[in-house]
Image (cartoon, rainbow, N blue to C red):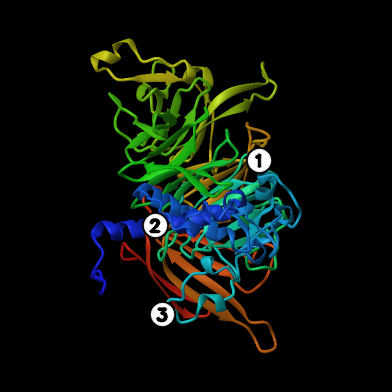
Amino acid sequence: MEEDTPAVGPPAAGELRQSSNMTLSSLGVSEVQGGDQNETDDPDTHPRYTGRTMSATPMTRRFQNLVHGAQSLRRFSAADANVVLRKSLLERKITRRGTLDFSSIQRRTSYGNLSLPDEDDNTTEALRATAHYTIEDNKELQPPVRADEQIPSHLVNHERTFGFNFDNRYNLVFFPDGERFAYSVGLFTKVYTLSNGEQLSIPSIDQGGVGALAIDPSGTYLAIGEKCHHRRPNVYVYDITTDFRTGDRYPAVLHRILRGGSERGYASVDFSPHDKTQLCTLGCSPDYLLSIWDWHSEKVLLRCKAFGQEVVRCVWGRFPGTLVTYGVGHIRFWKMAKTFTGLKLQGDIGKFGQAELSDIEAYFQLPDGKVVTGSEYGKLLLWEGVFVKCEMVRKAEGGGTARPCHDGPIGVVFIADLNTDGKEGGTVTTVVTGGHDGYIRWWLFEDVDQAEPPDDADDGQGLDVGITMLQEFRVPSGSSRSRIQHIERSKDSTKWLVQDSHHGVIWLVNMESTVQPQILQVIRAPAAPLTGVGLVMDGTPGEQLTSMAVVGGEDGAIRAYNVTVDTPAMAEYFHYNLEYDDDEEVVKVTSMIMVSSNSVIVGYDDGT
């Protein structure tokens, strides 16, 4: 009698689920047991040998999968792997192949084009202080080759640069030694030595020119904020304590690069006097971005838009965490405030109130926190908080009427001691101003600091307060009207560099005697765009061929430069002739044609 054979068919859903659970459970448990010999030695109790099933919930299955993955990784030999300990950019270290011991970690001597010292130093600060970039073979820093270039820029050698960028209102920075200063012209930052007239050129890396310069309070680093049209420009921080390599294309050591702070260029750069790691930058049009950097680490700490119109400068305030920006029709007071979401930049717009709205070009903060600024109508404005407290004018003498401090905009305001040359007290603290009328004037500090608005100010009678002028002199003395944009002082304040954008001259004022200061001409350059350039070639057979460049511009001046004879002053021999100047309006040069080796025809915009 045949036995009935059970029909074979697909397992029920429950059976399939049970089988699947059994498989996962067995795999998971076997891996776990494989890691613990105490629980796998008895085959009578292990499900793998007994065939018993172990149910698992979805959460258990996920846990078992994780355990399985972890145990699989353990089976790989660490001796055949590269173990990398990742840290910050400047502290990145790597282990040698074939070791589990991190005691063999060695510091990498370079990261890309950032060179690091080979010495074993565990402090980040020491590492950062000595690191530097190479420039020439750094692909990040090389400008693209444009299709319209007739000669690629890397095949052109720079010989000489003549000129000065008067469009930059603050284009002078003194080195700590008081013998050298830096300024920008074209695609270069020039370092000028006063004692011998020698000049050294630091080329623009971004190939768009230079927008701003600053030297840190210790006199160790020079920051150059550049401009660029093909990418976002950078701020380059150079170490100026090392000797310049005069024969190299890039003579200064590049210490840090601050990236992405503006779309087109930088209008202002300023190192913090309170925190040596912080620096603020201000972008040019169209973004006007105000950025606070930890420049040692090349990181942005805070960033926001400074204003909707042109902003000309950003400076740190007298107190930590405060800044000021100013420009066309505004001044703004900033502070770095801690909020529940972190550190923020908070800016308050200055309120002119009864005072006339004005562009601001000059600023200084008094010891008690009040602020003194210039104005475009010649008065000094005293700010308390965000409001104009009073407008300061020249005190009336002999029953006369009060007059503005300057005839025209005030471009310079700072505090300095005035030597009274043997008079009682020796020196007196003063507020110094420089204006577009060509005068430098000293005002009694107490009058400025203690100025109060008149009693009838609330009745709409104005905010004018008279202050005492102690001394004045004109730069240059007895000359036609100059326009003082900026005054840069040496560390000991004995040398002042005056930026005169009317004559196109940088004046050196020796302030060892403030009664009869000595005024010298250091640099003369076109103060407006050039409208004509000609080259005069001269030479006889057997003699050296010499060349002279003759230029004319919108400042109404004709200048000639010897461009072939090498001298310590970079062949700057000036032949200057200002034909048409009525002291109020300059007649511009509109065209210029060289007709022979010693003749030039010049046309002016008045038809001359």
As measured in the structure, the alpha-carbon distance from the residue carrying label 1 to the one carrying label 3 is 44 Å
**What kind of residue is marked 3?**
Ala
Q: Earlier in the sequence, mark 1 or mark 3?
A: 3
In the displayed orientation, state which residue is furthest to the right.
119
The quarter of the displayed image where residue 545 is located: bottom right
Residue placed farthest to the bottom in the image?
541
The disc, 2 or 3, on the residue closer to the chain's N-terminal end is 2
Q: Position of residue 346 (x, y in %)?
A: 38, 32
Q: Which residue is drawn at the image coordinates 65% and 67% (left, top)?
A: 80
Closer to us: mark 2 or mark 3? 2
- In the structure shown, which secondary structural element does the residue marked by tag 1 occupy? loop
Mark 2: secondary structure? helix
> What residue is rendered at 31% in x and 65% in y?
607
Give the distance between the C-alpha atoms of the residues marked 2 and 1, in whole angstroms. 74 Å
Question: What amino acid does circle 1 point to?
Answer: Ser
Q: Which residue is mark 2?
A: 22
Q: Please rate how many residues cluster around mark 2, counting C-alpha atoms within 10 Å: few if below 14, some from 14 to 19, many from 20.
A: many
Residue pointed to by mark 3: 147
Instruction: Identify the image quadrant of the C terminus.
Output: bottom left
Q: Is residue 326 above or below residue 389?
A: below
Residue 396 in sight: no
* x and y percentages locating residue 128 in the rendered image: 65, 49
